[in-house]
Amino acid sequence: MNQRYPAYLQLVQAQVFFRHGERTPMKARLTKDEKWLHCERANYLQSEFVKAIGRFVPLSEEMPVPHPERIGSDSQKYTSKTATLKSGIEYEPAKWILRLGSKSAPTAVANWTPASCSMGQLTDVGLDTLHRTGTHLRSLYADRLKLVPREAGDSARDWLYVRSTDYSRVLQSTHALLAGMFPSRDGSWPAFNKDFLRKFPIHTRMHNSETMHGNFGCFEFIKQFMDISCKDARQLKWIDDVYQQTVQLASIGDSARRMMDQPNFGSNFHIVYDELISLAAHGRPLPADVEHDHVTNLGRVGHHQWMHPVHSTTGQRLGFGRLLNDIMQTMVQATTPASMARIGAQHEGDLLLVPGGVRAPTAAETPGVPRLALYGCHDVTIAPLAIMMGSVDPNWLPFASMLTFELFKDSATPAPQPAQRNALPKPSTLTQPVGEDHYVRVLLNDEVLTLPTCQAHGKHHSRMGPSLCTLDAFLEHVAPIIATEEEYAKDCGTMPATFDYEE
């Protein structure tokens, strides 16, 4: 603890990206007869949440009819899964966000029990994992480092910024993490209700302005994920080995072959991995002839396919440059707090979850420049960011993984000379001054990532070494990845009028 956080370093800010907790598989193809009964508390908390924001639909009622103007509009592709009559904010293609049970399955109501899970749903196991994550963050950032208070009080938005994608499993994970970090005085979980939303402002975004999914509105980026061919992937021997070993399994081989041979979005192998890792995550037995090491190898192939586009600077810029710009702007604003009391333009597009609905925040509800920023997101958010920060881990990220950007100030240790600072490249979107004597550290699941740019002499802390990058060198590292909106428009190209996809 003292080696990582010595007394001469002042922690100024932490931005924490966390993946949602354990969930059911997105689809059950290999284990169609399996019953997923892990969601009793998750169902209750979710029903309380959707009641709080005015979205609850009883099991006996029909789902809201999709707004006809939203489906197939020229400006944005919507489907009946993502455009509801009630508000227009788009939740995941899992109908349990609005009701407990699945309208599409005729037997769902008859067979539904309070513990029943839908596909892709956060489970009670996932809730507990994120609650423990929140307890860990409380111990570190509130108890030990005093970055934030132990109790949120009535002024949380002055120092805390919370944002989640609009997927219900991520919103629930965000609640669980906050419940672990700021528990009720009696130690119980605070309910996910109107009082909770008043105390902890949670922001989300419409799908077409969300930067934590990858920029799938960019044609030059998204086309790299379309119609991924298993045959092409198998040109690499190690991938062909995994394929051959999978299809030879007596228990799942035939089904897995059909799944992998079909052109897919992102990866042909991840759909097999996802179902098997969901079993393992809930302590359920794998098919008899499937070893855990084989599941890991399937995840590695999925990682190789999904992350291939972000191993190039162009792919990083087109897909995640906007998100990295949000991170960078939030970081730089914290270095000159006197000149910037409220968060800047990077919050544009935010919507606030409030009692009774979802709306744009008022000027008075604009968050302060945060000491702690929490971002509820996905594996395909964190893994690309980690690669940009120097990670070479080939494995698919576990549930509840975290990527943290820590900002420090050290006025006592001599820093590089101003002339050297000013000579380093900076992102073209950066228009405000950068405070002196600041450093950045990036951690993936508590393991320090060393940015390649920061290893050179004069680009890291003289006592902490390359693990603690000067802020100026960090800005140099991200400069090629961050572009202006005009540059994005030019590089992304025009989305064909007939182009459509479904993740």
Image: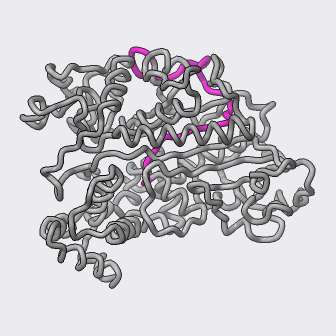
Residue at 83% in and 66% down: 458
Range of magenta residues: 355-380
Between residues 296 and 330, which one lies in front from this camera angle?
Answer: 296
Is residue 98 depicted above or below 466 in this figure? above
> Does residue 65 show up?
yes
Instruction: Indicate the quadrant where residue 470 lies.
Output: bottom right
Residue lying farthest to the bottom in this orientation: 237
User: Can residue 359 be found in the magenta stretch?
Assistant: yes
Percent x, y of residue 430: 69, 47
Residue at 91% in and 59% down: 417
Percent x, y of residue 80: 20, 35
On screen, residue 16 versus residue 294, left or right, reads: right
Percent x, y of residue 498: 23, 51
On screen, residue 362 versus residue 423, left or right, reads: left
Instruction: Indicate the quadrant where residue 124 lies.
Output: top left
User: Can residue 24 be found in the magenta stretch?
Assistant: no
Between residues 305 and 112, which one lies in front from this camera angle?
Answer: 112
The way the protein has been coloured in the rendering is one colour
Is residue 462 depicted above or below 324 in this figure? below
Percent x, y of residue 90: 33, 33
On screen, residue 110 versus residue 214, left or right, reads: left
On screen, residue 488 versus residue 436, left or right, reads: left
Residue at 77% in and 47% down: 408
Residue lying farthest to the left in this orientation: 106
> Does residue 72 show up?
no
Residue at 63% in and 62% down: 449
Between residues 115 and 121, which one lies in front from this camera angle?
Answer: 115
Query: How many numbered callouts?
Result: 0
